[in-house]
Image (spheres, helix red, strand yellow):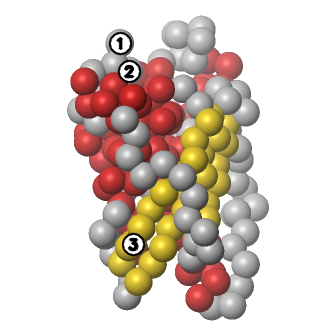
Amino acid sequence: MYNEVVMDHFTNPRNVGEIPNADGVGSVGNPACGDIMEFYIKVKDNVLEDVKFKTFGCGAAIAVSSMVSELAKGKTLDEAMQITNASVIDALEGLPKKKHHCSNLGADALHRAIEDYQAKQKGNTFEKPADSSEVCSCPVCDVSDPEEAPFCSSACDRTTTK
């Protein structure tokens, strides 16, 4: 079901943990599938010096979090904000269709951590957008799959391709 790259990131996840006094923290969760991701970042000179995560979820969610942390570490904030669900899936050399929504969660959690950092730099507190939902959106949904339909078909009405 999962390829070697996904299995490697699931069984040997990189950058797991918290960063004490993180410069930014971003959390996302999907109550329908049970995945919860939290990213912590340390920023120096506009570069992500360190990226860590804690994820509660399936093997794909853990692999996605690990890959997102690897993709982001050492990047500028602007470069890290360009990490998308598609780039995560590509870096993992594919995910089963019904697990594509996990790639959105990972990218979104990272983006929220960066937005939290940027808000703090302006003396503000980051708040999720008012239209934000804790139901993740799926970049490629398979509504004929009954396991996917309860959360995916409604989420795809709000699909984002950050």
| Residue 48: numbered disc | 3
Comparing labels 3 and 1, the label whose residue is closer to the camera:
3
Instruction: Tell me whether circle 1 and circle 2 mark residues in contact (CB < 8 Å).
Output: yes
Q: Position of residue 151 (x, y in %)?
A: 66, 26
Residue 155 relative to residue 61: left or right: right
Q: Is residue 150 visible?
A: yes
Figure check: 60 above or below 121: above
Q: Point out the image quarter for the N terminus.
A: top left
Q: Is residue 111 above or below residue 5?
A: below
To which residue does mark 1 refer? 1
10 Å crowding of disc 3: few (<14), some (14-19), many (20+): many
For the point 62% across and 74% down, which residue is it?
21
- Can residue 140 be seen at all in this image of the molecule? no
Within 10 Å of the Cα at label 2, are there few (<14), some (14-19), or many (20+) other Cα atoms? few
Element carrying mark 3: strand
User: Can you identify the residue that label 2 sits on?
Assistant: 96
Splitting the image into 4 quarters, where does residue 95 fall?
A: top left
Upstream in sequence: badge 3 or badge 1: 1
